[in-house]
């Protein structure tokens, strides 16, 4: 079953390779979506794909790359659109 989730990640998540880490995990799991830095220092990600794959991406986001410190991850479930063809850094 396809699902979509939006994540807002807080902590030391900018200038530590978080977006590149997210892109690598997303491509490995075969999900679509995007990731971007927000002006307030958080990272936002939208991930769409098979439920198990999206859950594995979420688990990785909660951990982050070695240079990051993830303090919190807000998650919002959305209806999958199927409009995205790959995963991109915005």
Image (cartoon, rainbow, N blue to C red):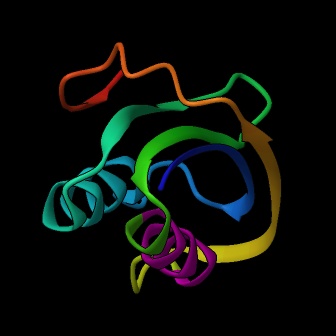
- Image height check: is 73 above or below 52? above
Q: Position of residue 61 (x, y in %)?
A: 54, 69
Q: Where is residue 14 in the image (x, y as percent from the top left)?
A: 54, 49
In this view, the residue farthest toward the front is 1
Count of all numbered marks drawn on residues in the image: 0
Instruction: Decide if residue 90 is on the left or right side of residue 11.
Output: left
- Residue nearest the observer in this picture, 41 or 47: 47
- Residue nearest the observer in this picture, 71 or 79: 79
Q: In which quarter of the image is the C terminus?
A: top left
Q: Is residue 45 magenta?
A: no
- Residue nearest the observer in this picture, 46 or 39: 46
At a point 23% along the width and 66% down the height, the residue shown is 29
In this view, the residue farthest toward the top is 83
- Residue nearest the observer in this picture, 41 or 20: 20
At a point 55% along the width and 32% down the height, the residue shown is 37
At a point 76% along the width and 44% down the height, the residue shown is 77
Q: Where is residue 88 in the image (x, y as percent from the top left)?
A: 26, 29
Instruction: Decide if residue 13 is on the left or right side of residue 10.
Output: left
| Quadrant of residue 62 within the rendered picture | bottom right
The magenta stretch spans which residues?
A: 54-63
Q: Does the magenta stretch include residue 60?
A: yes
At a point 55% along the width and 84% down the height, the residue shown is 63
Q: Main secondary structure of the magenta part?
A: helix
Instruction: Decide if residue 87 is on the left or right side of residue 50.
Output: left
- Image height check: is 68 above or below 88? below
């Amino acid at each position: 079953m396809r699902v979509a989730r939006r994540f807002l990640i807080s902590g030391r998540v900018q200038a530590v390779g978080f977006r590149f880490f997210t892109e690598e995990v997303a491509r490995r799991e075969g999900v679509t979506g995007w990731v971007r830095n927000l002006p307030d220092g958080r990272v936002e990600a939208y991930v769409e794909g098979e439920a198990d794959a999206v859950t594995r991406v979420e688990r990785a986001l909660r951990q982050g790359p070695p240079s990051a410190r993830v303090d919190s991850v807000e998650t919002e479930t959305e209806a999958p659109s199927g409009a995205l063809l790959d995963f991109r850094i915005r």
